[in-house]
Image (cartoon, rainbow, N blue to C red):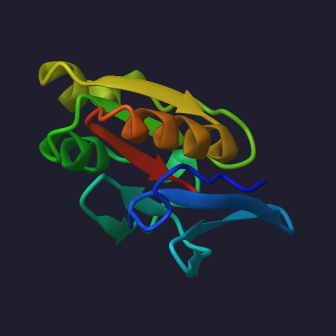
Amino acid sequence: MKLLLNNPDQFQIIRSCEKSGHRYQIRIGDTLYQESMILTSEKLEMWPISQVSDLKNEDFVHFANLGAEVLILGTGNTMVFPDPVITQALMEKGIGMEVMDTAAACRTYNILISDGRSVVAGLML
């Protein structure tokens, strides 16, 4: 599926999120990514997490320290909720979290970014 907004030159906009075999691949600008990532309006960092069971408390502390008002967590092909115990850092800072499959997370991220919202996306591929 192609995801284009009015400003496709903005580095942080996801241009497409497509299935490649049993995994997703995401295009941002002219670059195609096939590894999980953390994406904000200002930066992109690779993330060595491929499934929810790999998540640790430290991941959510990192998300909380990025300063966003909401975390969009894309969990791959299906929506899988992380253990609430490890998400404590988000609650302590008043950061909301939405969990969805990665394709839905990409669409939601683009909508929130285009509305000027402060958002971080953790996208598992």
Asked if residue 121 lies left or right of residue 16, the reply is left
On the image, the x and y values in percent for residue 16 come to 66, 60
Residue furthest out toward the right: 21
Q: Residue at x 25, y 44 (%)?
A: 63
Asked if residue 43 lies left or right of residue 61, the reply is right
Image quadrant for the C terminus?
Answer: bottom right
Count of marks placed on residues: 0
Depth check: give the residue in front, 11 or 119. Answer: 11
Depth check: give the residue in front, 10 or 103. Answer: 10
Q: Is residue 39 above or below residue 63?
A: below
Q: Residue at x 41, y 39 (%)?
A: 114
Q: Is residue 125 visible?
A: no
Asked if residue 12 lies left or right of residue 88, the reply is right
Residue furthest out toward the bottom: 31
Q: Is residue 98 visible?
A: yes
Q: Residue at x 73, y 56 (%)?
A: 2
Q: Is residue 36 above or below residue 29?
A: above
Image quadrant for the N terminus?
Answer: bottom right
On the image, the x and y values in percent for residue 80 come to 62, 33
Depth check: give the residue in front, 102 or 42. Answer: 42
Q: Is residue 30 above or below residue 77?
A: below
Residue 57's image quarter? top left
Depth check: give the residue in front, 13 or 26. Answer: 13
On the image, the x and y values in percent for residue 30 come to 55, 80
Q: Is residue 94 above or below residue 37?
A: above
